Image (cartoon, rainbow, N blue to C red):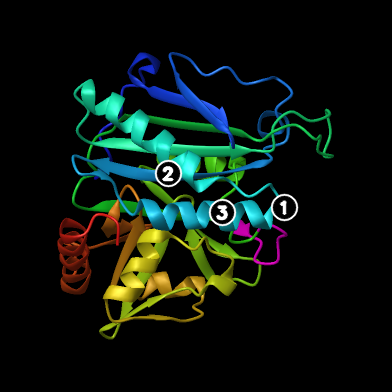
Amino acid sequence: MRGRVPEQWNPEAVRIWQGDNSGGQLVDRASISALDHGFTVADGVFETLKVVPGGPVALSRHLRRLGDSAQVLHLPTPDISVIRTAVAEVVAAWQGDGGVLGRLRITYTAGEAPLGSERGDGSPTLVVAVTDTVPWPDTTTAVTVPWTRNERSAVAGAKTTSYAENVVALRAARERGASEALLANTVGDLCEGTGTNVFVVVDGRVLTPPLSSGCLPGITRELVLEWCDVREETLPLSVLESADEVFLTSSTRDVHPVVRLDDREWSEPGSVSADVRREFAARIAHDIDP
């Protein structure tokens, strides 16, 4: 299996900033109310970024998307200046401890609320945390799963903290020896992975599902669309059975060529996928926050 080297979970190695829209501070351990709506009903949004020695990658775009997701959920607008300060403080503390390659998580929830779907009038909760991570291997594996994305969901396209269906799908993929699960939407069109966007190469053309498919507007997806010759196109899930190449994108994987998908195998990454991967790496090396 060409999977990821398992990370050793060590809560002591995580650096955490906790607060709200008015500010906050570094803490040894986060303390979230049991009544927080993010805990009780997953009423929140988040962003995950890769951190390299130069800092967080594509931070400005991630903060923009955090605001967009908060707007979909009708959460109070997050104070971006507060979040930038929190990110700077937590990353500096983590790097001071010797951090080199990290995963940064920004979580923004509705705060304390009644034990139901209705919201309270408390302040939103903001937590920024960073921990060490390990590089993904050069290639990856994926499987299709029987569950679907709802392209007509009230929160389609928002990066919410409601990730239970992703947990179930990813577990199914891991049980089949793969690193990612790929899903169709309710009409049978290719949509996305549990934490990735998916691209296919067909007769030399690089294609990816449009946002109308219900997929998340991934930041790496967005950059690949801007920097490379890629088209958005509605695609049946069956395109995965015949595509010349398949690759995934995410903020931690960057551009990740697939070499095994269900029963299909490739001996090496396709040339188009490799070219897109090199172009993305070169651009990010030139500008960490494009």
The residue that label 2 is drawn on is 48
Residue at 27% x, 57% y: name it.
256
* Up-down relation of residue 31 to residue 255 (above or below): above
Out of 285 and 139, give the one closest to the viewer.
Answer: 285
Nearer-N-terminus badge (2/1):
2
Report the front residue among 76 and 5: 76
Residue 89, image quadrant: top left
**Mark 3 surroundings: few (<14), some (14-19) or many (≥20) residues within 10 A:** many
Instruction: Measure the C-alpha gap from mark 2 to mark 3.
Output: 14 Å
Q: Find numbered disc 2 in the image and state the secondary structure of the residue it sits on.
A: strand
The amino acid type of the residue labelled 1 equals His
Q: Amino acid at mark 2?
A: Thr
Relative image position of residue 38 (x, y in whole percent): 66, 34
Distance (Cα) linking label 3 and label 1: 10 Å
Q: Residue at horizontal 40%, vertical 17%?
A: 11
Query: What residue sits 40% from the left and 70% below the top?
Result: 240
Residue 44 seen in this snapshot: yes
At which x and y percent is residue 6?
30, 30
* Highlighted magenta segment, given as a residue range: 147-155
User: What is the secondary structure assignment of the residue under circle 3?
Assistant: helix
For disc 1, the marked residue is: 74
Residue 176 colored magenta?
no
Q: Residues within 10 Å of mark 1 (few under 14, many from 20)?
A: few
Q: Nearer the viewer, mark 2 or mark 1?
A: 1
N-terminal of the two: label 3 or label 1?
A: 3
- Which of pointers 2 and 3 lies earlier in the amino acid sequence? 2
The nearer-to-camera label among 2 and 3 is 3
Q: The disc labelled 3 sits on which kind of residue? A: Gly
Q: In screen coordinates, is 116 left or right of 174?
A: right
Residue at the disc numbered 3: 67
